[in-house]
Image: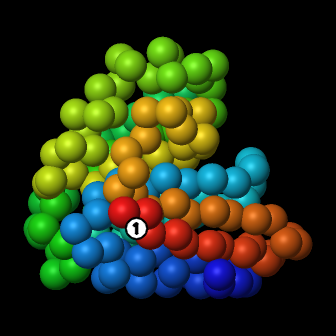
Amino acid sequence: MQISKSVSQTHKIADNLLKNLGNANLLCLYGELGAGKTTFVQGLAKSLGIKKRVISPTFVMMREYPIIANSQLLIVNFLYHIDLYRIESEKDAISLNLKELWSGSKNLVVIEWAEKIKKILPKKRIDVKFSYVSQNKRKISIIHRH
C-alpha cells in the first residue's frame, strides 16, 4: 500500500508499476469516482512516451493509444484504456472484445471499474485499488495475481 499526496506522486507510482510488470499486461483499477484511476492511467501513458492527452473514456468506453517509440520499460505497441462505469453487466462489455485485447502480448490493457466484469477477468492480472483519503491524498494498493 502506498499513499499519494499529488498528481505527480500518482504518476510516479504508475511509472514504478510499469517497471515491475513482469509479463503481466492487464491492469484492473478499482475505486470510487475521483479516487485517482484516470490520473494513474495518465501516468502510465506519460511513462510509455504517449504524447496524446489521456482522458477518461467514460462515454466511448475505450481509447487506444499507439506507442510509437517502444519504451525502455516494456515492449508493447498499444495502450488500451477502458472505462466500464456505464455498463450494466458483463454482456455489455462483449462488444469490446476484451479477452482478445488482454490476450495480445503486445497490448497493455487498463480497465477502470473492472469489478463490473469480475466473472470474466483472467486470474493473471494486476489489481490496483484506489481509496480516497482526503482532498489531496489517495491510498493505492497494488496486488499481483497469478
Give the residue at x 34% y 50%. 109
On-image quarter of the N terminus: bottom right
- Is the residue marked by circle 1 packed among few (<14), some (14-19), or many (20+) residues within 10 Å? many
Viewer-proximal residue among 65 and 23? 23
In the image, farthest residue toward the right: 134
- In the image, 112 versus 7, the foreground residue is 112
Residue type at the position of mark 1: Leu
Occupied quadrant, residue 22:
bottom left
Residue lying at 58% horizontally and 20% vertically, measured from the top left: 89
Rendered image quadrant of residue 128:
bottom right
Residue 80 appears in the rendering: yes
Q: Is residue 105 above or below residue 99?
A: below
Query: With respect to residue 27, does 65 lie above or below?
Result: above
- How many numbered marks appear? 1
Give the image location of residue 102, x and y in percent.
27, 44
Q: Position of residue 12 (x, y in %)?
A: 49, 83
| Residue located beneath label 1 in the image | 44
What residue is drawn where x is 50% and y is 16%?
92
Task: State the residue at coordinates (16%, 46%).
Answer: 104
